[in-house]
Amino acid sequence: MKALSAASRPALRPGCRLSPPSNPESLLLIPEGALRLHGPSRKILELCDGQRSIEEIIIELGQTFPSADSERIGAEVTGFLQRLQEKGAIELL
Amino acid sequence: MIPPPKALIAEITHRCPLHCVYCSNPLEMGRVELYTETWQRVIAEAAALGCWHLHLTGGEPLARKDTEQLVAAARDAGLYVNLITSGLGLTAERLESLVKAGLDHVQLSFQDSREESGNLFAGTRAHAIKLEVAERIRKHRLAFTVNMVVHRGNLDHLKELIALAETLGADKLEVAHVQYYGWAFENRERLLPTRAQLDESIATVAAARDRLKGTMRIDFVVPDYYAKYPKACMNGWGQGLMLIDPAGRVMPCHAAGVIPGLNFPSVEELSLKSIWESSEVFSRFRGDEWMQEPCRSCERKDIDFGGCRCQAMLLTGDAEATDPTCSKSPMRHLVDKIIGDIGQAAMPVPTTDWVYRINPTN
């Protein structure tokens, strides 16, 4: 498995997508099921477009949540994306 | 308050160009099928009820001409759409229109890694077409799963089967040992693996999972006849899944028709919500009120829910009995006898006298 780094550009794998905004629940839909998205997790995934690096995603989130500690944002984003990579929901470009 | 189902399995037709010797469809199938408009309404009802996924299956779901319309209806309703197909009928044009309609995931079945035996188990020449179809699928941005049902006749090719799925570029491989329902129950003596084959398959899958971590996931279903405890069938009756047959009968699983006395409500008469929440069929084996001993006082009753009701029916004649694959079942000797009778020596796979699945007749 490709190791996650600040320069990796994450993207949702084919067949993995966010539920439409009209859905009552915010979900990441994957072939095996779905993950309920809480807090900033939907925002993180919206930034996973295969263009932005993890470093850039962390900076953007910092701008959206200026009161949050940037180191904590970094750790949370990395941990979250790592779990999704293990589930096969994201790939690193 | 009954939690909603997470997935709807839509058996939209029982017509199929394949005749697989382990097909899970019922032995008696009808030709009556719901209209497109009815399926579209039912799909919207499933989404409103809380379903996340729609699994389009059959028979061969591409045997209907309106599969694209059903995919579109599901996407409109916010559902994730999976197509479970033999691949026959999945032309480049058809695939393109399905993708356009919003298809998310394709599961393509293979019967073996080798053409000759693959065609033998499918009862038709399908293998070569599947190889072409897999290539076609990979050209689109779809999740792609290769499904392989394994049994005595193809288990010795398991490493080859895994290599085939890798070559085809699958995101996921589903290796499922045959479950003994439907046509598989008819062919059980020929399909049951030996203990040695089973053990080897477990080791092979474990090694492949390790090697393929991060590239191809492997789902693995083991045969419960050899297990110590039964499977948590459907994660409990009426807990997370509902299935609708081609005629619109709503069932808790694909095999429930073997249980006598169940009257499956029709989507033409009742809403999915009322069927899920208050029909007799869906309430029949929910919770543990119905359980007999040893299930009722068993510490595992919330883990495996007494196993499978259909299997209890098929093997003991009593749908309320403990699933006899459980080592605690007073009827476990029935399963041990079946395993004992097939012998544990490697046996050549018979090439004749299979019971092949036939197409709907009534």
Image (tube, coloured by chain):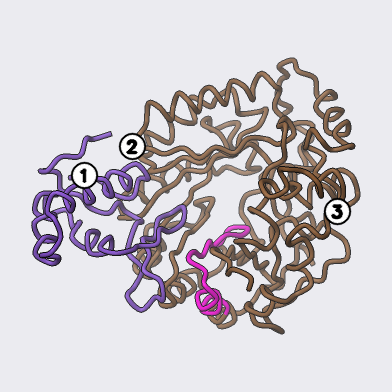
Chain colours: A purple, B brown
- Quarter location, residue A29: bottom left
**Between marks 1 and 3, how big is the CA–CA gap?**
50 Å
On the image, the x and y values in percent for residue A47 come to: 18, 60
Residue named by callout 3: B320
Quarter of the view holding residue B263 = bottom right
Taking depth in this image into account, of B33 and B73 the one nearest to the observer is B73
For the residues carrying marks 1 and 3, which lies nearer the camera in this image? 3
Calculate the distance from the C-alpha at mark 2 to the C-alpha at mark 1: 12 Å
Q: Nearer the viewer, residue B70 or B306?
A: B306
Q: Report the chain holding disc 2.
A: B
Name the residue carrying label 2: B215
What residue sits 61% from the left and 53% below the top? Answer: B17
Disc assigned to residue A92: 1
> If the image is split into quadrants, where does the C terminus of chain B sit?
bottom right
Please tell me which residue lies in front, B64 or A82.
A82
Q: Earlier in the sequence, mark 2 or mark 3?
A: 2
Residue span colored magenta: B42-61
Identify the element where label 2 is drawn.
loop
Residue A36 falls in image quadrant: bottom left
In the displayed structure image, the side of residue B99 where residue B256 appears, left or right: right
Query: What residue is drawn where x is 20% and y is 56%?
Result: A48
- Above or below for B247 versus B271: above
